[in-house]
Amino acid sequence: QGVEQASRSELSGELSGPIHRDRLFYFLGGQLLDRSYRSPDLASAAPRDFQGVRERRRDVRGVAKLSWARAPGERADLMLGYTAQDIANAGINGLDDPTALQRVAAPTLWYDASWRGTIAANATYEARLAGFDARESRDGNGGARTPAVRLLRLGDIPSFQNAEFSQRSEPSSHTASLVLRNAFHMFGAEHTFASGAELSIGEWTDARMRNGGLTWRPY
């Protein structure tokens, strides 16, 4: 409801190069992004009044990569990455009291490893392992034991004391695969036959809890 970005700052950098000439290479990169948002105070009649608190977001991203050229036709790559988002006073809207907002934390770790090589002059393979583990929590500013207060009336009614719910989600996925390719000549042309296998394992946890076990709805 009229939420606007009030400030933004960013810091980023990267570093790359060889560890062993023509064989082993690395890459490192990172970013830090801070933003704040403000909302008009809908409880005030003044045209330029904003709520006294701001939603503050911090995003962190990092990635690291190693590449190894063991021999002609053989290469290994390993990537690791991390992202995280932290939000204070999430859900600012100009209506709800700051005590009814949420704190958000959402870190994710991911990886990707692959190996490509040659079996024979006309046969190659590629093995890969990739996946991620993530977590997101949305907690009320008042804690899990404090119930929210929301007036029992029609229209847009503000909340007080705490957010109505806290939430947790934890998705994860991991995949392993192997692909074989064989090149051959037939009917006057080059052909490629590919075969492979893949195994994926994933999980998902999602929970939503009412803070304090109830929500007060006074009239």
Image: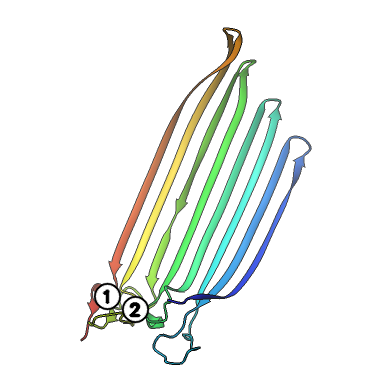
In percent of the image, x 71 and y 25: which residue is there? 72
Which residue was labeled with disc 2? 162
- Is disc 2 surrounded by few (<14), some (14 to 19) or many (20+) residues within 10 Å? many
In this view, the residue in front, 165 or 93, is 93
Q: Residues within 10 Å of mark 1 (few under 14, many from 20)?
A: some
Left or right, 212 with reference to 95: left
Q: Nearer the viewer, mark 2 or mark 1?
A: 2
Indicate the position of residue 140 as horizontal and vertical percent values: 37, 74
Amino acid type of disc 2? Asn
Q: Quadrant of the N terminus?
A: bottom left
Residue name at image x 54 percent, y 45 percent: 111
Task: Please provide percent x and percent y for residue 193.
Answer: 52, 18
Quarter of the view holding residue 42: bottom left
Spot the residue most to the right: 21
Residue 212 bears which disc, if any?
Answer: 1
Q: Is residue 208 above or below residue 15?
A: below
Badge 1 element: helix
Which residue is outermost to the left?
219
Q: Residue furthest front?
A: 47
Distance between the alpha carbons at the discs numbered 2 and 1: 9 Å
* Residue 141 figure quarter: bottom left
Q: Are marks 2 and 1 in contact (CB under 8 Å)?
A: yes
Callout 2: SS: loop
The amino acid beneath tag 1 is Gly
In depth, the one of 66 and 29 nearer the eye is 29
Could you tell which of marks 2 and 1 lies nearer the N-terminus? 2
| Residue 216 falls left or right of residue 160 | left
